[in-house]
Amino acid sequence: MSEGTGVVVAPKEGSSHHLLQICCVGLAALVLSVCLAVSVGAVSVSMETVWGVLVNKLVPGLVEPSWSLGRENILWQIRLPRALLAIMVGAGLSIVGACLQSVTRNPLADPHLIGISAGGAFGAVLALLHTGLFLGMLTVPLLAFLGSLGATLLVIGVAKFTSATSADRLVLTGVAVSFVLMAGANILIFLADPRATHTVVYWMLGGLGLAQWEHLIYPLVVLALCGLWLWLRAGHFNAMTIGDETATTLGISVATFRLETFVIGALITGVMVAFSGMIGFVGLMVPHIVRLFVGGDYRRLIPVSALFGAVFLLLADVVARTLMKPEDMPIGIITGLIGGIFFIWLLREKR
């Protein structure tokens, strides 16, 4: 560990060759997962058609179309935007979970468990059912972000008020705040027009079915900018993992950095929730699994978590769309089932 500009360089963990192998495996899994995600569903599309449509869209005229316009529309207008949204949501939630686990020094920290996702859902429901889209397409992401930020500040405030300083009690505080916010969201749904509530209730269970090309720019910009901000501070996260005193001695303003991380985490989570609903446990599971292969150095952990978070959510979406075909099961049910089992295992390991 070294001190220079206040940024900590963590002990070297594994070789660059090992990291390269993991990244190659992850990228191969990502490409295969995207191909699988756009080819399976209520209507199957052959892999030959998948590649033909993609090549034809990227380089018009290079391939002679041998597929129907209907299959092309299913692949290009529905499944590919959905797959890209799954990549962004999985990557975003994974890096938020990893960073929250550092600044809280809590292995159970996750945007879903500590109430950030519930705050985002509250803000999104408020925009969808009551305020109207007064800022156009920015309304839902903006109110979802404000809801996530409010939930974060509420968790911090309640934790201080109840002197819940330990890791376990912080999670319990987050769960309590999450229940309160979900109750508030349910009240908003109850008071809204019954004709509009069915779609919102389905959306709250988590789903990627509303993905559209013209909307993907919002989560993409937020993920790119905020993800880069977090990665550039990987040394800070390494120091925060060791402890506040170590971070302070290395010139890091602990309170300010922790607050900045909460705000950035709330922004990513809020925007992802606005476009996908509540998808839990991704930020809990993926960083823990990735640590087994790349160690705890955040210079590696953040990008590799983003990569495997994207793969995980793509595969979860494939399961959600094929398990009860042709019904489209909310993806939050799948991640909740897997995450709940993982959470129990983690509790046993950390006892």
Image (cartoon, rainbow, N blue to C red):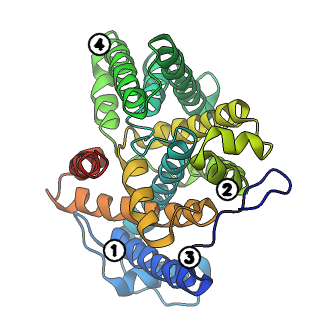
Tell me, yes or no, if residue 158 can be seen here. yes
**Earlier along the polypeptide chain: callout 4 or callout 2?**
4
| Secondary element at image label 3 | helix
Is disc 1 surrounded by few (<14), some (14 to 19) or many (20+) residues within 10 Å?
Answer: some
Residue annotated with mark 4: 190
Q: Of discs 3 and 2, which sits in the foreground?
A: 2
Q: On the rendered image, what quadrant is the N terminus found in?
A: bottom right
Nearest to the observer: residue 31 or residue 296: 296
Is disc 4 surrounded by few (<14), some (14 to 19) or many (20+) residues within 10 Å?
Answer: few
Residue 268's x, y, as percent? 57, 42
Residue annotated with mark 2: 234
Nearest to the observer: residue 278 or residue 39: 278
Residue annotated with mark 3: 57
Is disc 2 surrounded by few (<14), some (14 to 19) or many (20+) residues within 10 Å?
Answer: many
Q: Of discs 3 and 1, which sits in the foreground?
A: 1
Nearest to the observer: residue 236 or residue 214: 236
Q: Amino acid at mark 3?
A: Lys
